[in-house]
Image (cartoon, rainbow, N blue to C red):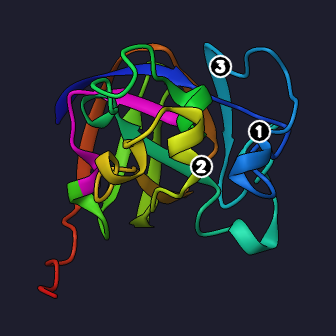
Amino acid sequence: MIDVEVVEPLVSPAHRLAGRPSEGPAPGPDDERVTRAEVRARLGLVGDRYFAQAAHRDASVTMMSVENLPTDVDPAVDLRQTRRNVLLRGVDVDAMVGATVSLHCGEGPVRFSLNRPARPCAWMNVTVGPGAHKALRDKGGVRCTPLDDGVLLVGPARFEVLSEPAPRRRA
Protein backbone atom coordinates (compact mmCIF):
# COMPACT_ATOMS: atom_id res chain seq x y z
CA MET A 1 0.00 0.00 0.00
CA ILE A 2 1.06 3.56 -0.72
CA ASP A 3 0.13 6.56 1.39
CA VAL A 4 -1.32 9.18 -0.98
CA GLU A 5 -3.40 12.31 -0.76
CA VAL A 6 -6.64 12.99 -2.59
CA VAL A 7 -5.90 16.63 -3.41
CA GLU A 8 -9.20 17.40 -5.07
CA PRO A 9 -12.09 15.65 -6.78
CA LEU A 10 -14.00 17.41 -9.54
CA VAL A 11 -17.63 16.53 -10.22
CA SER A 12 -18.88 18.53 -13.18
CA PRO A 13 -22.44 18.35 -14.45
CA ALA A 14 -21.46 20.25 -17.62
CA HIS A 15 -19.33 19.55 -20.67
CA ARG A 16 -17.25 22.72 -20.67
CA LEU A 17 -14.78 21.87 -23.45
CA ALA A 18 -17.05 21.34 -26.44
CA GLY A 19 -16.61 22.86 -29.86
CA ARG A 20 -13.47 24.67 -30.91
CA PRO A 21 -10.80 25.71 -28.43
CA SER A 22 -10.65 29.14 -30.09
CA GLU A 23 -14.25 29.73 -28.91
CA GLY A 24 -13.27 29.16 -25.27
CA PRO A 25 -14.86 26.95 -22.63
CA ALA A 26 -18.63 26.79 -22.22
CA PRO A 27 -20.04 28.43 -19.10
CA GLY A 28 -20.57 26.29 -16.04
CA PRO A 29 -20.50 26.43 -12.27
CA ASP A 30 -17.83 28.66 -10.74
CA ASP A 31 -16.21 25.74 -8.94
CA GLU A 32 -16.90 22.07 -9.54
CA ARG A 33 -14.26 20.90 -7.07
CA VAL A 34 -15.80 19.05 -4.15
CA THR A 35 -14.52 17.61 -0.87
CA ARG A 36 -16.63 14.45 -1.16
CA ALA A 37 -17.54 12.46 -4.27
CA GLU A 38 -19.93 9.51 -4.34
CA VAL A 39 -18.79 6.65 -6.57
CA ARG A 40 -21.10 4.08 -8.16
CA ALA A 41 -19.75 0.85 -9.59
CA ARG A 42 -19.51 0.90 -13.40
CA LEU A 43 -21.36 4.25 -13.50
CA GLY A 44 -18.89 6.89 -12.27
CA LEU A 45 -19.19 9.86 -9.93
CA VAL A 46 -22.73 10.86 -8.96
CA GLY A 47 -23.54 14.23 -10.53
CA ASP A 48 -20.70 14.15 -13.08
CA ARG A 49 -21.26 14.66 -16.81
CA TYR A 50 -20.09 11.10 -17.57
CA PHE A 51 -22.17 9.39 -14.86
CA ALA A 52 -24.12 6.42 -16.28
CA GLN A 53 -23.28 7.35 -19.88
CA ALA A 54 -23.00 4.11 -21.87
CA ALA A 55 -20.30 5.57 -24.16
CA HIS A 56 -18.12 6.34 -21.12
CA ARG A 57 -18.59 3.22 -18.96
CA ASP A 58 -14.91 2.28 -19.24
CA ALA A 59 -13.82 5.90 -18.83
CA SER A 60 -16.30 7.49 -16.43
CA VAL A 61 -13.62 8.62 -13.94
CA THR A 62 -10.23 10.11 -14.77
CA MET A 63 -7.40 10.08 -12.22
CA MET A 64 -4.37 12.32 -12.49
CA SER A 65 -1.18 12.80 -10.48
CA VAL A 66 -0.60 16.29 -9.07
CA GLU A 67 3.09 15.80 -9.80
CA ASN A 68 2.24 15.79 -13.54
CA LEU A 69 0.32 19.07 -13.61
CA PRO A 70 2.08 21.55 -15.91
CA THR A 71 2.83 24.08 -13.16
CA ASP A 72 5.63 25.51 -15.30
CA VAL A 73 2.91 26.66 -17.73
CA ASP A 74 0.52 27.85 -14.99
CA PRO A 75 1.47 27.56 -11.31
CA ALA A 76 -2.23 27.66 -10.32
CA VAL A 77 -3.38 24.82 -12.62
CA ASP A 78 -5.87 22.36 -11.11
CA LEU A 79 -8.69 20.05 -12.17
CA ARG A 80 -10.87 22.93 -13.36
CA GLN A 81 -8.47 23.41 -16.27
CA THR A 82 -7.55 19.77 -17.01
CA ARG A 83 -11.13 18.47 -16.56
CA ARG A 84 -9.93 15.30 -14.80
CA ASN A 85 -11.95 13.96 -11.84
CA VAL A 86 -9.51 12.88 -9.13
CA LEU A 87 -6.17 14.53 -8.40
CA LEU A 88 -3.78 12.37 -6.35
CA ARG A 89 -0.46 13.23 -4.74
CA GLY A 90 2.16 10.54 -4.18
CA VAL A 91 1.53 8.03 -6.96
CA ASP A 92 2.20 8.01 -10.71
CA VAL A 93 -1.14 6.79 -12.05
CA ASP A 94 0.05 7.25 -15.64
CA ALA A 95 2.47 4.35 -15.13
CA MET A 96 -0.37 2.04 -14.05
CA VAL A 97 -2.51 1.71 -17.17
CA GLY A 98 -3.95 -1.80 -17.15
CA ALA A 99 -3.82 -2.21 -13.37
CA THR A 100 -6.65 -2.65 -10.90
CA VAL A 101 -6.17 -0.46 -7.84
CA SER A 102 -7.92 0.32 -4.59
CA LEU A 103 -8.28 3.83 -3.15
CA HIS A 104 -9.29 3.97 0.52
CA CYS A 105 -10.16 7.43 1.84
CA GLY A 106 -11.44 6.29 5.23
CA GLU A 107 -14.96 5.19 4.30
CA GLY A 108 -13.97 1.86 2.75
CA PRO A 109 -11.91 0.96 -0.29
CA VAL A 110 -13.08 1.68 -3.84
CA ARG A 111 -11.52 -0.39 -6.61
CA PHE A 112 -10.83 1.07 -10.06
CA SER A 113 -9.78 -0.52 -13.32
CA LEU A 114 -7.21 1.83 -14.88
CA ASN A 115 -8.13 1.29 -18.51
CA ARG A 116 -6.30 3.71 -20.78
CA PRO A 117 -4.38 6.96 -20.87
CA ALA A 118 -6.33 10.20 -20.86
CA ARG A 119 -4.77 11.88 -23.85
CA PRO A 120 -4.49 15.65 -23.57
CA CYS A 121 -6.09 17.70 -26.30
CA ALA A 122 -5.61 21.15 -27.80
CA TRP A 123 -7.97 22.55 -25.17
CA MET A 124 -5.12 22.31 -22.65
CA ASN A 125 -3.33 25.16 -24.44
CA VAL A 126 -6.45 27.29 -23.88
CA THR A 127 -7.49 26.30 -20.36
CA VAL A 128 -4.00 25.92 -18.84
CA GLY A 129 -1.79 27.92 -21.20
CA PRO A 130 0.41 27.66 -24.29
CA GLY A 131 2.53 24.52 -24.18
CA ALA A 132 0.29 22.58 -21.77
CA HIS A 133 -0.88 20.15 -24.47
CA LYS A 134 2.69 19.05 -25.11
CA ALA A 135 3.62 19.11 -21.40
CA LEU A 136 0.77 16.70 -20.60
CA ARG A 137 1.68 14.16 -23.29
CA ASP A 138 1.93 10.77 -21.49
CA LYS A 139 1.07 12.57 -18.21
CA GLY A 140 -2.60 13.43 -18.72
CA GLY A 141 -4.02 10.90 -16.30
CA VAL A 142 -5.82 7.59 -16.68
CA ARG A 143 -9.42 6.85 -17.65
CA CYS A 144 -10.96 4.42 -15.18
CA THR A 145 -13.96 2.27 -14.41
CA PRO A 146 -15.05 2.23 -10.77
CA LEU A 147 -15.66 -1.36 -9.67
CA ASP A 148 -17.31 -0.60 -6.30
CA ASP A 149 -19.74 1.85 -4.76
CA GLY A 150 -18.06 4.15 -2.28
CA VAL A 151 -16.90 7.61 -1.35
CA LEU A 152 -13.78 9.63 -2.20
CA LEU A 153 -12.76 12.30 0.29
CA VAL A 154 -10.15 15.05 0.17
CA GLY A 155 -7.21 14.19 2.40
CA PRO A 156 -4.96 11.24 3.21
CA ALA A 157 -5.76 7.93 1.53
CA ARG A 158 -4.29 4.49 0.94
CA PHE A 159 -3.58 3.40 -2.63
CA GLU A 160 -3.05 -0.29 -3.34
CA VAL A 161 -2.20 -2.01 -6.61
CA LEU A 162 -4.35 -5.15 -6.74
CA SER A 163 -3.22 -6.36 -10.15
CA GLU A 164 -0.14 -5.15 -11.96
CA PRO A 165 -0.39 -3.10 -15.15
CA ALA A 166 0.27 -4.75 -18.47
CA PRO A 167 3.78 -4.20 -19.85
CA ARG A 168 3.94 -1.17 -22.13
CA ARG A 169 4.60 -1.85 -25.79
CA ARG A 170 7.43 -0.02 -27.45
CA ALA A 171 6.44 2.01 -30.49
Amino acid type, residue under disc 2 in the picture:
Trp
Amino acid type, residue under disc 3 in the picture:
Arg
Near mark 1 (Cα within 10 A), the count class, few <14, some 14-19 or many ≥20, is some
- On the image, the x and y values in percent for residue 109 come to 44, 36
Q: Is residue 139 left or right of residue 165?
A: right
Instruction: Please report whichever mark, 2 or 3, sits nearer to the chain's N-terminal start.
Output: 3
Contact flag, marks 2 and 1 (Cβ < 8 Å): yes
Which residues lie in the magenta part? 86-94
Where residue 162 sits, quadrant-wise, is: bottom left
Which residue has dot 2 on it? 123
Of circles 2 and 3, the one toward us is 2
Q: Is residue 142 left or right of residue 34?
A: left
Which residue has dot 1 on it? 25
Which residue has dot 3 on it? 33
- On the image, the x and y values in percent for residue 129 come to 48, 33
Amino acid type, residue under disc 1 in the picture:
Pro
